[in-house]
Image: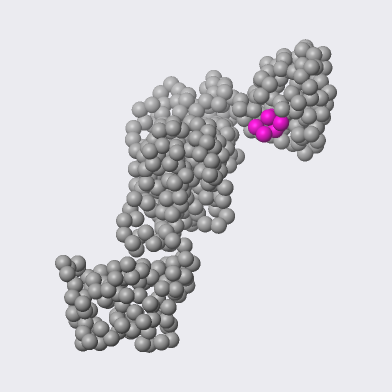
Amino acid sequence: MHVAHLLQDASLGLRPLWSEEALLRREISGVTVTDLEDPARFVRPGEIVLSGLVWWSADGGPGRAERFVRGLREAGAVALLAGEETHGSVPGDLVEACARHAMPVAGVPADVMFRAITDTVYLRQWGDLSRHHAGHDALPEHVRLLLNGLVAREAGPAEILAAAFPPDPPAAHLLTSAGRTVAATPGAGPAPVRVPAAGSDGGVTVAVDTDADVTPYERWWLHLPDAGAAPARLLHEITAVLGRCQEALVRRRRAVRRAADGLGAALTGDDAGEVAAAARACGLPAEGPYRVVAADAGARRGDLALGALAEAVGRTGPACAAVGRLPGGTAFAVLPEEAAAGLAPVWPPVCAAEPGTLVHAGLSAPTAGVAGLPGALAEARYALAAARTTVPAAPALADATGLTSLDALLTGVPAEVRAAFSRSTLGPLLDPADTSAAALLNTLEVFLAHDGSWARTAEALHLHVNTVHYRIRRIEHFTGRDLARLSDRLDLWAALLCRTEPDGGRPVPAPRRARPTTSSAR
């Protein structure tokens, strides 16, 4: 139902006061009735707002109307219907504010009840469920009416699924593409670990079509293990209702995501007060412990990374969590430590729901409370870089607590930085056209891998120990490092680890370390 449909309904007698044609084509998602001076937090995107204007007064100045309309615009309302009974007409400053903020406005005559407008919207919006010809309906009339009411008041999928199969419901599961159970009929038993193909287990699986903006990971499927438990026409009617239910859930989720995006912006700033306030807006207690996840799916695929991360977090079932985007578009989540522990096992099956997309993620170490979230985000982004480096061809989640070796730690450093460090540290030893440089580089690798032992290096290279001494002196000359010093050995070892393949991507495999010894002969 569009705004124009409502304003043109002759039975309501609404008086259009300002609008533009393009704005009248916006779809109505619902109705909110309010007389609050600041109604924004109670208005959902796509809603018509009905107000009796009790909050307005002539001595309140134009600023009061301006704040009211600005709040409606920021909340995503599509039109304002203003009651004329309280003041005799709609105040001019309110109409002017609506024009400034591109908010269609109409007057509601004193003899028109707001209930009549609300009923008109919902009957028009959901009436298609009961406009079937006799003999072509699978759902009984009373069930259809019940489902109409449930959808109109935005009931959850579990309630709708339970009401759709009276009086003796068959086993039925509502699943996401990634295998999360959204709802099930009473006594349905264990859900499949993934969405079964139709007939693969003798059952039937029907896609839930929806106009909601959902990613492939979050798409709903209705599965019945017994294919003969319900006719196909009945299942399609039920999935149509469930599709509208998902649309309502997505509309409500937008406000939650906006709050999470605000937290993401605060985490990338430097104001601890903003972080605390944004966390409270997301419903996160001040005390954790928390862990932060960062995820991306490559260029221009931010929605897919966000969908995969939201689905993975949903499967861990946290008591509280925030899932949104950072200012640069990277998806992130803040969730309790106990829930984050379950991310690693669910990440592969979630990503498998969209095989053509590589989603990488990084998980921070635990932080005690909200104050530590900015640092945890930095850890998560570093672990994300490590995941992309170490497993570039498959979805992967890297845990910052697992970066316990130098080579693992360096995988989070950008490839360009690794390459620059390797070039500046090893210098002429990296010249591919110099065969003597290649021999020196190989000697350095073996020498460090054998903990600086002259004898074992000579044995491994089949060289005389004097030759090893000579080559080490040449290496020290070219690099300016003293291989008798531990710090210089570490620098050169890191430089070897930072070498990249010719395409500048993955690091060259680390030199193999020899078995440690209690001493090393120089």
Q: Percent x, y for residue 327?
A: 57, 47
Whether residue 143 appears in this view of the structure is yes
Q: Residue at x 71, y 17 (%)?
A: 55
Residue 494: quadrant of the picture: bottom left
Is 12 drawn above or below residue 102 in the view shown? above
Q: Nearer the viewer, residue 73 or 63?
A: 63
Is 246 drawn above or below residue 466 in the view shown? above
Whether residue 177 appears in this view of the structure is no
Q: Percent x, y for residue 125?
A: 65, 28
Is 288 drawn above or below residue 496 in the view shown? above
Q: Residue at x 19, y 72 (%)?
A: 520
Count all numbered tags in the image, as a single digit: 0
Chief secondary structure of the magenta span?
A: helix
Q: How is the image coloured?
A: one colour
Query: Quarter holding the C terminus?
Result: bottom left
Q: Is residue 512 left or right of residue 178?
A: left
Q: Nearer the viewer, residue 375 or 432?
A: 375
Q: Percent x, y for residue 139?
A: 53, 27
Q: Nearer the viewer, residue 416 or 54?
A: 416
Q: Is residue 305 left or right of residue 39?
A: left
Q: Is residue 500 left or right of residue 472?
A: right
Query: Quarter holding the N terminus?
Result: top right
Q: Percent x, y for residue 506?
A: 42, 67
Q: Is residue 29 left or right of residue 220?
A: right
Q: Residue at x 52, y 57 (%)?
A: 298
Q: Which stretch did the figure color magenta?
A: 70-75
